[in-house]
Image (cartoon, rainbow, N blue to C red):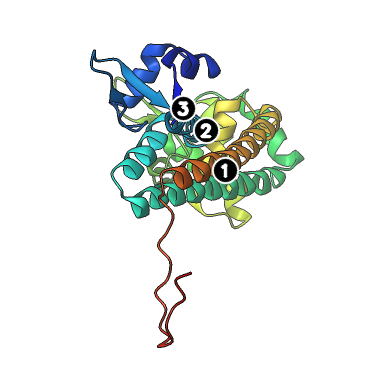
Amino acid sequence: MITVRPSDLAREHGLSTQAVRNYERDGFLPPAERTPTGYRIYTEVHAVALRAYLGLVAAYGHATAGRIMNALHDDELDDALRIIDGGHGQLLRDRETLDSVRRAVKHLTAESHALADHAEDIDSRTIRELAHGLRLTPATLRNWESVGILAPVRDPATGYRRYSASDVRDAELAHLLRRGGYPLEQIATVVQQIRNAGGTAALAAALDDWQRKLTAQGLAMLDAAGLLGTYMRLIDHAAPEPVSTSSAPVSRR
């Protein structure tokens, strides 16, 4: 087996030799044998393991990548595959959320922009005033608050809710999306995105950036799968061959 110097392992990825040792200590790399004087002996197996681990980091993050490598080194292949499946499932959910936000934003018509702009000229409102303006009940606004669509402040003297201009804007947008048939959970996501982005125009750019990140993550998952597959074949973690149910003898050539 060809040995590899720790410095060579580290240099390939722009790491420190201590980082490589830490990865071994944490079980992300297989245990290294030691020389009689205590020096670690790294091999090509460790080099391939390190490439696989760092590929997983790019695809799933440090914590999940570590769990996958730990499971493999504990001979828990199914656990490792479940973790990978969970990562792919999360990516799919993120894609679906992005699609739902894009569809919802398309429903924010010129009328909604005019209402949002008008909200900037409005003083803070009580829950009854806002409910009356939207032709809703106060209970509906409290429900929207419970799922994160609205976030009013409380008057320090009375403890009553006060809705600022931005709260009025969020309520107007939520009301528009609700009339479009969107469930509250999706509306909360859209309103939170608009709130964080600073408006629908900024949100459009944020959604494009989100799309690019999801695409990059999907490609990283493909790369990680190839690197992990190479490592698994190297350490002989291939799935067992199926048992033949035929009564005919099996050739042993």
Q: Which residue, as the protein is rendered here, is positioned at the far front?
A: 253
Residue 15 position, x and y percent, is 47, 14
Q: Camera-side residue: 213 or 148?
A: 213
Q: Which residue is mark 2?
A: 55
In the figure, residue 215 lies in which quadrant? top right
Query: Mark 3 against mark 2, which lies toward the viewer?
Result: 3
Residue 243 position, x and y percent, is 39, 74
Q: Please tell me whether residue 168 is drawn above or below residue 175 in the rendered image.
A: above
Tell me which numbered mark, 3 or 1, is placed earlier along the sequence.
3
Amino acid at dot 1: Gly
Helix, strand or loop at mark 3: loop
Tell me which numbered mark, 3 or 2, is placed earlier along the sequence.
3
Q: Camera-side residue: 195 or 51?
A: 51
Query: Mark 3 against mark 1, which lies toward the viewer?
Result: 3
Residue 62 numbered tag: none
Q: Which residue is mark 3?
A: 2
Q: Residues within 10 Å of mark 1 (few under 14, many from 20)?
A: few
Amino acid at dot 3: Ile
Residue 156 as seen in the image, left or right of residue 188: left
